[in-house]
Amino acid sequence: MSLPFSYKGFRNINFDFTLFYCVINTAEIFNGIIADGLSLKDHLFPVLRDCLQGFTLNILLFIPFGCLLAINVRKSNVLKVMLGSFIFSSSLEILQLIEVLFSLTHVRVFDIDDIIANAIGVITGFFFAILLPKIMKIEVSI
């Protein structure tokens, strides 16, 4: 089933502009499992694991980037970090589209959830780098 903001375009490049598509897809699978009387353990949990794993790994991947922004950018604030993470993450997603256009592989997908997860990771890393020295009472010039 295709959601309203999903698009399969030229050379089968997938664009997914549906926010939290994984959650919506999991809800549809859950309804199907309940309707068919199947076991949640055998059918729903693998889907949840795959969805959450990708989202969580995107967050963890960008935590160091947020720490580096907090340490290296003078007078950085949350708004600058959010804007920087959005631009950087969007650039990566656009590069994935360009890579698919000029290669023989068709495995990359433009996904808005990746941009959101990456921004969450950057902001988490930013706060971690700002708050950790205060908690540990370490004198750091940021």
Image (cartoon, rainbow, N blue to C red):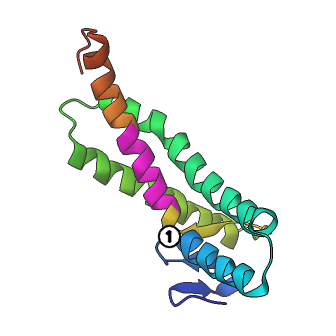
Q: In this view, does 59 lie to the left or right of 135?
A: right
Q: Which of 42 and 3 is in front in this view?
A: 42
Image-quadrant location for residue 111: bottom right
Give residue 33's position: percent from left, percent from top: 74, 79
Q: Is residue 117 magenta?
A: yes
Tell me: residue 41, above or below residue 74: below
Residue at the extreme front: 37
Q: Residues within 10 Å of mark 1 (few under 14, many from 20)?
A: some
Name of the residue lying farthest toward the left? 75
**In the image, residue 26 lies in the stretch drawn in magenta:** no
Horizontal and vertical percent position of residue 63 = 46, 38
Residue at 47% across, 51% down: 118
Q: Is residue 71 visible?
A: no
Image x and y of residue 50, in percent: 70, 59
Which residue sits at x=63%, y=82%? 28
Q: Which residue is drawn at 24% across and 9% down?
A: 139
Q: In the rendered view of the protein, which quadrant contains the C terminus? A: top left
Relative placement, left or right, of 50 versus 131 is right
Q: Check disc 1 and report the residue beneath it.
A: 20
Q: Which quadrant of the rendered structure holds the N terminus? A: bottom right
The image quadrant that residue 140 belongs to is top left
Above/below status of 72 relative to 119? above
Task: Kindly state the secondary structure of the residue where label 1 is placed.
Answer: loop
Three-letter residue code for mark 1: Phe
Q: Does residue 139 show up?
A: yes
Residue 48 x/y as whole percent: 66, 62
Q: Which of 139 and 34 is in front in this view?
A: 34
The range drawn in magenta is 114-124
Dominant secondary structure of the residues highlighted in magenta in the image: helix
> In the drawing, does residue 3 fall left or right of residue 74?
right
